[in-house]
């Protein structure tokens, strides 16, 4: 006996109506992070001993700037999703859980925005 309506069964929606999309977004960001982090690590190794100006020139190139922005955005989206799952699973008090989830999402957006602003400042010579 199922307690789900036929519409919910057809759409595949759970009680929160967003579990599937949350799960997929976490997997998509994880897969996207594999090549992005490989590129980032190779870039750090290649430019690890570089002086300030050559490191700035590397980060200021259009392809590098775009890849860095993608890396920052994807990393913070993926991290916020993962921490949200941990909070949902292990924080028992609903008000505290909601407050922490909002705080994590706000912090992720704020820190990612600062990183993206820094990359754009370097890329456009600001």
Image (cartoon, rainbow, N blue to C red):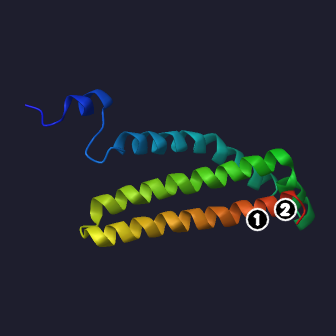
| 76 sits left or right of 65 in the view | left
* 11 versus 91 height, above or below: above
Quarter location, residue 5: top left
Residue drawn at (88%, 58%) of the image: 124
Query: In terms of secondary structure, where does tag 1 sit?
Result: helix
Residue 100: percent from the left, percent from the top?
39, 69
Q: Does residue 103 appear in this view?
A: yes
| 19 sits left or right of 107 in the view | left
| 64 sits left or right of 34 in the view | right
Residue drawn at (42%, 60%) of the image: 83
Determine contact: label 2, label 1, CB under 8 Å: yes
Residue drawn at (64%, 40%) of the image: 35
- Between 14 and 32, the residue placed more toward the observer is 14
Quarter location, residue 18: top left
Find the distance from the CA under tag 2 to the CA under tag 1.
6 Å
Residue drawn at (36%, 59%) of the image: 86
Residue 84: percent from the left, percent from the top?
40, 58
Instruction: Name the residue tied to disc 2.
Output: 122
Residue 42: percent from the left, percent from the top?
73, 48
Instruction: Name the residue tied to disc 1.
Output: 118
- Between 6 and 96, the residue placed more toward the observer is 6
Tell how many labels: 2
| Within-10-Å neighbours for mark 2: few <14, some 14–19, many 20+ | some
């Amino acid at each position: 006996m199922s307690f789900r309506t036929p519409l919910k069964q057809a759409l595949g929606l759970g009680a929160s109506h967003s579990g599937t999309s949350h799960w997929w977004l976490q997997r998509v960001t994880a897969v996207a992070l594999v090549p992005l982090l490989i590129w980032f690590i190779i870039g750090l190794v290649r430019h690890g001993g570089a002086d300030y100006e050559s490191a700035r020139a590397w980060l200021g190139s259009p392809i590098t700037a775009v890849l860095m922005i993608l890396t920052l955005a994807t990393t913070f989206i993926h991290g916020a999703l993962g921490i949200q799952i941990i909070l949902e699973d292990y924080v028992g008090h609903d008000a505290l859980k909601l407050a922490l989830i909002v705080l994590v999402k706000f912090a992720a957006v704020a820190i990612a925005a600062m990183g993206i602003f820094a990359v754009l400042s370097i890329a456009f010579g600001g």
